[in-house]
Image (spheres, grey):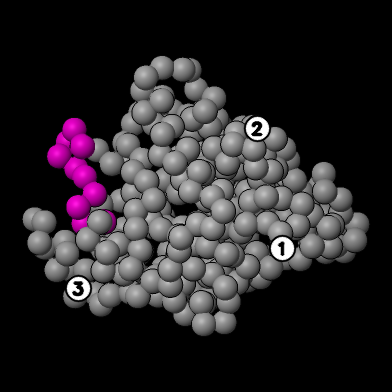
Amino acid sequence: MSLILAVYGKGGIGKSTTTANISAALALQGAKVLQIGCDPKHDSTFPLTGTLQKTVIEALDEVDFHHEELEKEDIIQTGFAGIDALEAGGPPAGSGCGGYVVGEAVKLLQELGLYDQYDVILFDVLGDVVCGGFSAPLNYADYAVIIATNDFDSIFAANRLCMAIQQKSVRYKVQLAGIVANRVDYQKGGGTNMLEQFSEKVGTKLLARVPYHELIRKSRFAGKTLFQMEDGPEKDECLKPYNEIAQFLLSEEPSASVPVPIGDRDIFEIVGGWQ
């Protein structure tokens, strides 16, 4: 059976870049990995493949939604370190539901007999959970991972995600593995103080602290993972958190919990206390 992860976070938080580097770390530690992008922009897997690949919805549309006419090669592209990449795509703007698209992608994987052929499957999900559709990957996941930065908007979104995970856990097996602190900039006086306090209050932990570094941004625009960039001490520093996350996820039984979200006013108290 595959270990299935649903990765969430506020839009623009660096979630897809983080997910791709986690996928790379998992693969380089010996796991067979599938990354599924769940965003109409279909750029989640760009760092793995260096291209914007065809989406499941585009492939299905070409065969008039006859699933049986599609093969693995029609929807999956193999990228860095042997990672298989799939982009679910999305409905036209203003119509349809993102949850339906995710469901179609999972259905097609199952029909092709691929769903259980991986050690780890990662769903990289669009932004915050603002509707039931975007929470659909939680129906399939063993664990959710939240990507966040040390600011109010990000923590507010993380709390909303905790609400969704708590609600889904009543009917499904999903739990929260933890929060990844992204773009941590100690040089400019930043840190993870608010994220640490928030994590403690909702009953989870920080899985890792990813530094704010130009090398990570450059790798994204180059269509590469950080692992493919030129070697050096700065690269080693940036790689460390991704490798730590991979080691944690591949451990025999990663620790996780059902989060207990806090009230909006409590978030303001956390932020206000660090002004």
Can residue 239 be seen at all in this image of the molecule? yes
Q: Position of residue 192 (x, y in %)?
A: 24, 49
Q: Position of residue 202 (x, y in %)?
A: 31, 69
User: What residue would you read off at disc 3?
Assistant: 266
Give, as a single range, the part of the protein colored magenta: 186-195
Left or right, 63 with reference to 116 = right
Q: Residue at x 65, y 42 (%)?
A: 31
Reply above or below: 258 against 247.
Answer: below
Q: Position of residue 131 (x, y in %)?
A: 49, 74
User: What residue would you read off at disc 1?
Assistant: 106
Left or right, 241 with reference to 80 = left
Q: Earlier in the sequence, mark 3 or mark 1?
A: 1
Left or right, 6 with reference to 256 = right
Q: CA distance from mark 2 to mark 3?
A: 43 Å
Specify the farthest residue to the front. 252
User: What residue would you read off at disc 2?
Assistant: 81
Q: CA distance from mark 3 to mark 1?
A: 37 Å
